[in-house]
Amino acid sequence: MNKYAIIDIGGKQLRVEQGRFHDARHFALVQHMLTPNTKISISRVLLIRHGSSINFGYPWLNDAVVKGRILHGSFGKKLVIQKIHSKKKTRRILGYRENMTRFVVDSIHFGGKDLNKF
């Protein structure tokens, strides 16, 4: 693929392309606002590649926006934590699943232009 962007979301950096869905954790401070088909725009864009041109931000690109919509909430893979004290003969097993939000990228804008139109 020759058109993609790298965004900073939920403490991680994701490589996003138009039409693909991605999972992000800690997407918003208010979880009840994340209903399906909610429009989102992400302005923390680190890099945009369009064909042979690559634009870097320091730390982010000022005039770049990734627009998309939320598909649904989901859970991540279950993490199991085992604490074993061998001399005391005690064991404790904990586990949790992280809340994730699945979103799809509709368009990537840079400099006021939609890169997917070219």
Image (tube, rainbow, N blue to C red):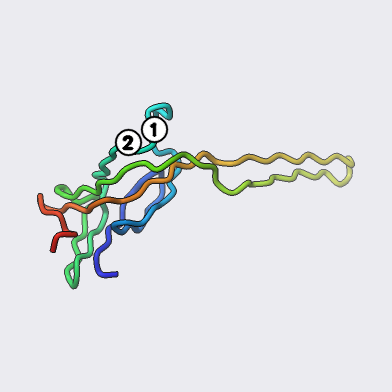
Q: Please rate how many residues cluster around mark 1, counting C-alpha atoms within 10 Å: few if below 14, some from 14 to 19, many from 20.
A: few
Residue 92, given in percent of the width and then of the height, sits at 78, 39
Q: Please rate how many residues cluster around mark 2, counting C-alpha atoms within 10 Å: few if below 14, some from 14 to 19, many from 20.
A: few
How far apart marks 2 and 1 lie (CA) works out to 6 Å
Residues at circles 2 and 1 in contact by the CB criterion of under 8 Å: yes
For residue 35, which numbered disc appears in the image?
A: 1
Q: What residue do we see at 80% from left, 45% from top?
A: 84
Q: Quadrant of residue 42?
A: top left
Q: Is 32 situated above or below 43?
A: above
Q: Quadrant where the N terminus lies?
A: bottom left
Q: What residue do we see at 23% from left, 60% from top?
A: 48
For residue 105, which numbered disc appears in the image?
A: none
User: Which residue ends up furthest to the bottom in the rendered image?
Assistant: 52
Q: Secondary structure at mark 2?
A: loop
Q: Which residue is mark 2?
A: 38
Q: Quadrant of residue 20?
A: bottom left
Q: Quadrant where the C terminus lies?
A: bottom left
Q: Amino acid at mark 1?
A: Thr
Q: Is residue 34 left or right of residue 80?
A: left
Q: What residue do we see at 39% from left, 32% from top?
A: 35
Q: Amino acid at mark 2?
A: Thr
The residue nearer to you, when weighing 20 against 81, is 20
